[in-house]
Image (tube, helix red, strand yellow):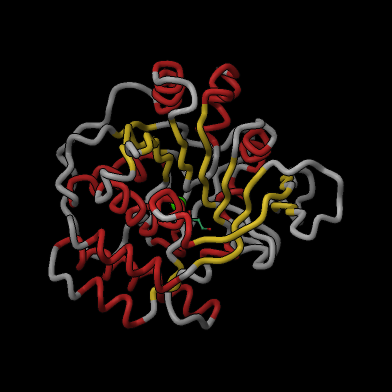
Amino acid sequence: MSPRKIIIDTDPGQDDAVAILLALASPEDVELLGITCVAGNVPLHLTAKNARVVCELANRPDTRVFAGHDRPITRALVTAEHVHGKTGLDGPALPDPKMRLQDAHAVDFIVDTLRREPSGTVTLCPIAPLTNIAHAFNRAPDIVGRVREIVLMGGAYFEVGNITPAAEFNIHVDPEAADIVFRSGAPITVMPLDVTHKALVTGPRLEAFRALGTPVGRAVAEWTDHFERFDKEKYGSEGAPLHDPCTIAWLIDPTLFSGRRINVEIETLSPLTRGMTVADWWGVTDRPANAMFMGDVDADGFFALLTERMARL
Ligand code: BDR
Ligand code: CA
C-alpha cells in the first residue's frame, strides 16, 4: 500500500514534537505533505519555530512548515506553559532553526492541497486546537468532502478533562472550531485522554529512548522527562502521557488501538464545561455517530513501535 498523504496541524509541544518525528521516521506509512502550525500550547511564533526545530533535529529541513492562526475563532487564547515550559519545547537545548517558514498561510496550504490532490487521499492530523482546520472548512466548504479522514488528538470521556475538570486542552482552547469540525461530516478518528493517559512514558520506556544514544533519542528522553514532572505531580502517574503521537501510531498500526463509533458533540455555551466532548459512549441517545472514538491502546506495542522508529532518525 502506498503511504498515506498527511498534513499535521500542530502546536509543539514536546508530545507534538514526538508525533512529527514519528511521521518523519515512517515514510513507508505516511507522506508528510506539510506541517501547519497554530497557537495552542504556546503562542504561534513559538509553535512555528518549534516545528522547524524538530524538523532540523530529524535532519529534514526540506519539510514544509506553515504558520496559521494566532488565536481561536472567537475567544482569547489559553496556553499551557505550565506543562510545556516557556518555549513550549523545554527540555534539551536545541539550536534555533535555519530553515524558513513557507510564505503561504497554513489555511491556504490546507485548502490548496485538498483541492489539488485527488479527492479522498489526504488525511488531516490535528494535534492542537482545531482553529486552522475550522477556518479552512469555513472558507472552502468544498474541501470537506475531499478529506480522506481527520485523525485528531483531543477530548475525553472517562478521563473528562485536563485543563479544566470538564475539558481536554485542545478542544477547550477553541470549542467553536471543534464544533465546526465535529459537525463537518468528514470521517473522524479521535484519540482522547482515555487513550493517551494509558500511553505513559514510564522509567524503562524513557531509558529505552535515551539508550538509542542518538540526538533524537536523547531529545525525546529529555522532553518527556521535562513534562513528566508535571503529570507525576498532578496525577501521581508513572510518567508523562504521549498524547499526540497516538494519532500517527494509529495510521501506522491501527491494531494497537480499539474504540467505538459514536456521536460526539462539543459544549460551546456553558462557561463551566466549555470544550467538553459530550461522547455518547454508551449509546444512550439516537444522535448519529460522527466519530470513531478510541478507548484503549496496547501501550507496550505503542512504545515498541515508537522506539523502533526513533532509532531510524
Ligand atoms: C493536548 O494538549 C497539549 O498540551 C498536548 O500537546 C496535546 O495535544 C493534550 O491535552
Ligand atoms: Ca499538541
Q: Residue furthest right?
A: 285
User: Quarter-wise, where is residue 303 in the image?
Assistant: bottom left
In this rendering, is residue 89 above or below 36? Answer: below
User: Quarter-wise, where is residue 234 in the image?
Assistant: bottom right
Q: Nearer the viewer, residue 77 or 164?
A: 164
What percent of the width, then of the height, locates residue 140?
A: 55, 17
Residue ID at (61%, 63%): 295
What percent of the width, then of the height, locates residue 122?
A: 43, 30
Residue ID at (48%, 59%): 255
Residue ID at (44%, 73%): 200
Q: Nearer the viewer, residue 257 or 183?
A: 257
In this rendering, is residue 212 above or below 285? Answer: below
Q: How many marks?
A: 0
Q: Nearer the viewer, residue 100 or 143?
A: 143
Q: Residue furthest front?
A: 1
What percent of the width, then of the height, locates residue 92?
A: 23, 64
Residue ID at (57%, 37%): 72
What percent of the width, then of the height, locates residue 267?
A: 75, 47
In the image, is 193 to the left or to the right of 248?
right
